[in-house]
Amino acid sequence: MTMQQETPHLLICFDESGKQSRDPIQLMGAFSIPTTIYMHPQYKDLHLLNKEYTLHWKEYGGDGKDRKGIEKLFQHALPLAEYMNFNFIRYSRSVLAEQANVFLDIYESKQVIVDNTVYAKLPERICYGLLRGYDEHNHVQATILIEDASEYRSRELDQTIKNSLNIHSLYRGEDYVIRECDYRSKGQEIGIEIIDILLGIVGLILDNPSAISNKKKAKIHLVLKLLKENRLQPFLKNLRLFELQQSNQLKEANIEASIKLFISKNYETFITL
């Protein structure tokens, strides 16, 4: 991403975690940050991390270099935390699939309307939550970046989000414009790595598993270490987490309570770090 005079001043990075119904936690989320801060030359070391490390939470299993890369990511991104806002939605594909039974005689597969709900409505609500509320003296122009994935491209998610949010802005008289919505491959944009890893960490905290593999043990150990060193908290304090209830209402959840439960369940490890 190049810094130009006409670059919109707000950047939003979007991703998801736990795409399958069998995954214990399904999350979608995004963060926003002023582009001038995100692209400031003093944070060039943050943007260079992609060249040296593979930053992918799903693949992390305790490898020393990968761990060092994630730790450096939080170290270099820490000065940006106070300027970042996060908006996450937790939902359940299985619950949506059950509710979609009423459409069985309309669609060849109810999965069609479930997927359309997940990939059309939820991303719009997440991004809108990061854009709303600016007054007429703070007109916002924004760019949205999405982690590149076939399920997004097949649904033209970039155009769907851009058009629906701009329509929403016009209809509600909001003061924002989405100038661009595009895809970024892994390793191409550090903001995509940040949202990928934060989604994975929050998902792990919410799941708070008991029976765990060695790979998950390594993830838990790393999250506990980041919490012990107070590297996660500056990001999590600017995070709003919503849960899609069976009534299809969004209810805000208390992430702080989940963090305390996560630490208490792993307290013996936590105090020895």
Image: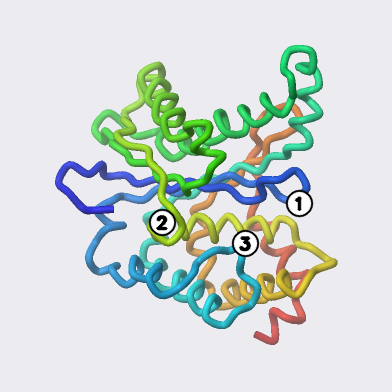
> SS at mark 3?
helix
Looking at marks 3 and 2 on the same chain, the residue that comes earlier in the sequence is marked by 3
Crowding around mark 2 (Cα neighbors within 10 Å: few <14, some 14 to 19, many 20+) is: many
Return the mark for residue 24: 1
Q: Position of residue 27 (x, y in %)?
A: 63, 46
Q: Position of residue 247 (x, y in %)?
A: 74, 27
Query: In the image, 66: left or right of 216?
Result: left
Looking at marks 3 and 1 on the same chain, the residue that comes earlier in the sequence is marked by 1
Crowding around mark 1 (Cα neighbors within 10 Å: few <14, some 14 to 19, many 20+) is: some
> SS at mark 2?
helix
In the picture shown, does residue 174 fall above or below 122?
A: above
Residue in view at x 40 percent, y 30 percent: 162
Query: In the image, 165: left or right of 2?
Result: right
- Mark 3–mark 2 distance (CA, rounded to whole Å): 16 Å
Depth check, front residue: 5 or 181:
181
Residue in view at x 38 percent, y 41 percent: 182
Among all residues in the image, which is located at the extreme bottom? 272
